[in-house]
Image (cartoon, rainbow, N blue to C red):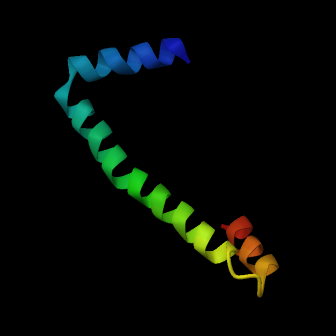
C-alpha cells in the first residue's frame, strides 16, 4: 500500500495530465458513490418489500 501510494504520488508530480485524470476520476465517481449510498439508504427504509430491494442490489 505504501509503495503504490508513493509511486502514484511521483507520477502525479511528474505529469499534469495524470493529475487531471485523477481529479476527473474523483469528481465523477465520488458523487456516483454518494448517490448510490443515498439511494440504498432510502430504498431500505420502507419495510414493504425489503427482500426484493436486496436482490436488486445483489444482482448489480
Q: Position of residue 50 (x, y in %)?
A: 78, 78
Q: Name which residue lies at 47% across and 58% down.
A: 34
Q: Does 8 sit left or right of 4 as displayed?
A: left
Q: Name which residue lies at 34% across and 18% down.
A: 9
Q: Position of residue 41 (x, y in %)?
A: 61, 67
Q: How many numbered circles are shown?
A: 0
Q: Quadrant of residue 22?
A: top left
Q: Quadrant of residue 13?
A: top left
Q: Quadrant of residue 14?
A: top left
* Name of the residue lying farthest toward the left: 16
Q: Is residue 30 above or below residue 59?
A: above
Q: Position of residue 12 (x, y in %)?
A: 28, 23
Q: Name which residue lies at 28% across and 40% down.
A: 23
For the N terminus, the quadrant is: top right
In-front residue for pair 13/33: 33
For the C terminus, the quadrant is: bottom right
Q: Is residue 12 above or below residue 2?
A: below
Q: Is residue 6 above or below residue 25?
A: above
Q: Does 11 sit left or right of 35 as displayed?
A: left
Q: Is residue 50 above or below residue 16?
A: below
* Name of the residue lying farthest toward the bottom: 48
Amino acid at each position: 500500500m505504501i509503495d503504490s501510494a508513493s509511486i502514484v504520488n511521483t507520477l502525479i508530480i511528474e505529469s499534469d495530465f495524470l493529475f487531471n485524470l485523477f481529479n476527473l476520476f474523483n469528481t465523477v465517481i465520488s458523487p456516483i458513490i454518494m448517490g448510490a449510498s443515498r439511494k440504498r439508504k432510502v430504498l431500505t427504509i420502507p419495510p414493504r418489500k425489503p427482500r426484493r430491494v436486496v436482490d436488486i442490489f445483489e444482482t448489480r
